[in-house]
């Protein structure tokens, strides 16, 4: 899951390798580590760009909390959050591609055991909350990820409910 998330952030050759179903190998892991190092080096104090590394985490953390950290491993919850983030990004084709990649690796693609309303309520308590707003990381395309995006509550609710459908 971490490789998939990082490939979406990086885009380019890393995304092509991951989306093409390539096996995770040393080169792919190195490319992921290099991507993360570049992001952290560009934002050492975690004031902006570094937030892109939280792609999928806002909803993923709410799912983990809702299920008492027992139903989903962290990566599984973030994978579900990633699917929701892609829906919020308006990237339906990319979301389907990611859904198939998750499914092909035996990872969950639907939310079970966590009431959607509870997950949505927990999102409002996210540690990244700024006043009344919870910023999301959204994807325009692989390699084009934006942090600090405001998303209407109704859209967040619809994305979580879609996961549970």
Image (cartoon, grey):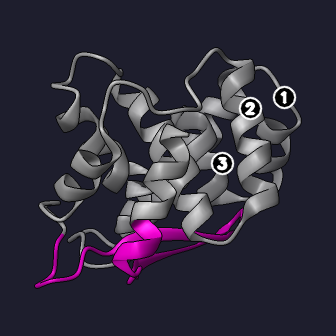
Task: Say whether marks 1 and 2 touch (CB < 8 Å).
Answer: yes
Q: How far apart are the two marked residues, 3 and 1, measured between alpha carbons? A: 12 Å
- Residue drawn where x is 53% and y is 70% of the image: 138
Can you give x and y, in whole percent of width and height, for residue 23 in the image? 78, 20
Q: Quadrant of residue 20?
A: top right
Check the image and name the residue furthest to the right.
20
Can you give x and y, in whole percent of width and height, for residue 28 in the image? 69, 33
Q: Is residue 75 above or below residue 105?
A: below
Q: Can residue 34 be seen in this snapshot?
A: no
Magenta stretch: includes residue 133: yes
Q: Which residue is mark 3?
A: 7
Can you give x and y, in whole percent of width and height, for residue 143 in the image? 68, 66
- Residue drawn where x is 25% and y is 74% of the image: 134
Magenta stretch: includes residue 160: no
Q: Is residue 48 above or below residue 127?
A: below
Q: Which residue is mark 2?
A: 101
Task: Name the secondary structure under disc 1.
Answer: loop
Q: Which stretch did the figure color magenta?
A: 129-156
Q: Which mark is residue 21?
A: 1
């Amino acid at each position: 899951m971490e490789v998939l998330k990082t490939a979406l952030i990086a885009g380019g050759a890393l995304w092509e390798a991951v989306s093409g179903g390539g096996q995770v190998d040393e080169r792919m892991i190195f490319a992921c580590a290099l991507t993360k190092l570049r992001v952290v080096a560009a934002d050492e104090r975690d004031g902006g760009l570094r937030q892109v590394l939280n792609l999928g985490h806002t909803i993923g953390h709410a799912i983990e909390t809702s299920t008492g950290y027992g139903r989903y491993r962290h990566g599984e919850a973030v994978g579900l959050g990633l699917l929701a983030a892609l829906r919020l990004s308006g990237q339906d084709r990319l979301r389907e591609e990611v859904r198939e990649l998750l499914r092909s690796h035996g990872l969950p693609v639907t939310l079970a055991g966590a009431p959607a309303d509870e997950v949505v309520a927990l999102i409002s308590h996210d540690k990244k909350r700024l006043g009344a707003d919870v910023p999301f990381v959204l994807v325009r395309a692989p390699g084009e990820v934006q942090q600090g995006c405001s998303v209407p509550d109704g859209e967040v609710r619809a994305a979580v409910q879609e996961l549970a459908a």
